[in-house]
Image: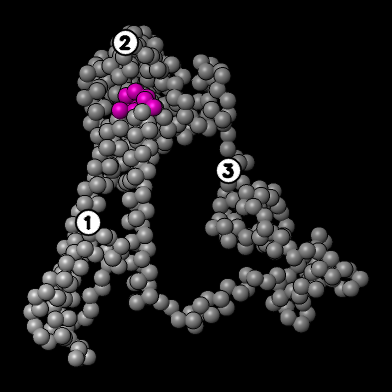
């Protein structure tokens, strides 16, 4: 007879997903078979306790082994993805692109598997420790009930309508009945507003004035927005002006449209994660980088000429100077062989789109050129790439650490 006496500090929970593993079930079957062939005791209670102890040891040992294998697989996939991305950065190849997508999909499948485990563990903790009783949900429903009713209406003349019997709630008949029957002959306004797209509500809210805004206020909160956000955006749209740098750049680049400038202004934050580079590109776009031409007017330097040759302007420092032209060509030869990828516009602003990897390279090249200008040194392509390789490794480490595979 098995005893019903409680023993031990508590109970151990088996990871049920192991039961779907054929190797684990074979291990359990072997333990049962060996115990059946060579019983250690005639007492069934002791035999059962001994079997449970062996099951527990086998489950823990096998679970740790599988977890170690999954961690190793994850690390190998991340390293593989990092290597393939580096190859694609140097040269586009359809085969490598296909291998990269396959590895990324495999890694995503693994993360989905981990996510399912997290959900199950979270659900178990909620059921055992954090489940709320029905009274909690009833009180929550009671507190939110006021948002489900229209309390007052205001017509175009500013007159208020409300239900006399229940001032906290307007009856449905008062809303939809015709005027000769004592109603307003209008649809259920709040239901109508709730059916609108959030973008429509935001667009209408910005141009709306009057008491009807209260209905849109409630609906904007449902979407997670606050009216103050749109008031602020509305205020910005009225006082904002075009940056003066746009007009100055238009002298050299007259083909840039408003959409192009929107993309250009977003480049610093999409091309690099380092704040120093973001701030540098921001100053470059707004033409506030200190050049000798500007500093000479301010009386900070004696000459307006370039550190290496002619009069120093932004276009001259980063493109027209013969030393910079040679540096850019040498860098392109080292990475792209005989293929030239940068034009003056793509090197200054964006290459195709803000997230293109060439923007990351161009941003580091410009930053290195400016550093050389400050220390009055001619840019050297070998010195640049020794720095750039380290920066690439740092970005790869950040990507692996944050598990950003795209």
Reply above or below: 204 against 350.
below
What residue is at 16 percent from the left and 63 percent from the top? 61
Q: Quadrant of residue 82?
A: top left
Residue 88 belongs to magenta span: yes
SS class of the residue under badge 1? Answer: helix
Q: Residues within 10 Å of mark 1 (few under 14, many from 20)?
A: few
Residue 356 visible in image? yes
Task: Decide which of tag 1 and tag 3 comes sooner along the chain.
Answer: 1
What residue is at 80 percent from the left and 72 percent from the top? 174
What residue is at 28 percent from the left and 42 percent from the top? 77
The residue under label 1 is: 66
Residue 376 visible in image? no
Specify the segment rendered in magenta: 87-94
Tell which residue pokes out farthest to the right in this image. 180
The residue under label 3 is: 236
The residue under label 2 is: 326
């Amino acid at each position: 007879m098995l005893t019903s006496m409680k023993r031990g500090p508590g109970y151990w929970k088996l990871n049920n997903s192991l039961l779907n593993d054929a190797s684990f079930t074979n291990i359990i079957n072997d333990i049962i078979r060996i115990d059946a062939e060579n019983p250690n005791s005639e007492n069934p209670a002791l035999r059962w306790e001994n079997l449970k102890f062996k099951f527990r040891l086998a489950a823990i040992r096998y679970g740790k082994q599988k977890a170690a294998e999954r961690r190793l697989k994850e690390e190998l996939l991340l390293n593989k993805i990092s290597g393939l991305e580096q190859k694609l950065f140097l040269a586009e190849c359809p085969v490598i692109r296909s291998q990269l997508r396959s590895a990324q999909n495999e890694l995503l499948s693994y993360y989905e598997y981990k996510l399912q485990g997290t959900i199950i563990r979270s659900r178990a903790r909620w059921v055992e420790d954090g489940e709320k009783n029905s009274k909690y949900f009833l009180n929550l429903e009671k507190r939110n009930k006021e948002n489900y009713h229209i309390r007052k209406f205001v017509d175009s003349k500013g007159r208020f309508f409300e239900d006399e019997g229940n001032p906290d709630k307007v009856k449905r008949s008062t809303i939809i009945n015709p005027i000769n029957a004592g109603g307003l002959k209008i649809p259920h306004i709040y239901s109508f507003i709730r059916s609108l797209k959030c973008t429509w509500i935001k667009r209408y809210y910005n141009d709306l004035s009057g008491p009807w805004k209260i209905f849109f206020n409630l609906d904007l909160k449902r979407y997670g927005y606050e009216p103050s956000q749109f008031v602020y955006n509305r205020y910005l749209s009225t006082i904002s002006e075009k940056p003066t740098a746009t007009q100055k750049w238009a002298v050299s680049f007259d083909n840039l449209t408003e959409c192009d400038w929107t993309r250009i202004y977003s480049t610093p934050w999409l091309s690099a994660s380092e704040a120093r580079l973001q701030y540098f590109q921001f100053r470059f776009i707004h033409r506030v980088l200190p050049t000798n031409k500007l500093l000479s007017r301010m009386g900070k330097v004696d000459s307006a000429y370039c550190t290496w040759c002619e009069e120093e302007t932004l276009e001259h420092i980063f493109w027209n100077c013969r030393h910079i032209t040679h540096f850019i060509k040498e860098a392109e030869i080292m990475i792209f062989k005989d293929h030239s990828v940068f034009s003056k516009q793509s090197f200054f602003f964006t290459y195709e789109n803000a997230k293109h990897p060439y923007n990351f390279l161009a941003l580091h090249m410009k930053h290195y050129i400016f550093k050389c200008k400050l220390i009055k040194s001619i840019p050297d392509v070998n010195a640049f790439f020794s720095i750039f390789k380290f920066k690439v490794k740092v970005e790869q480490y950040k990507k692996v650490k944050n598990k950003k595979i795209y």
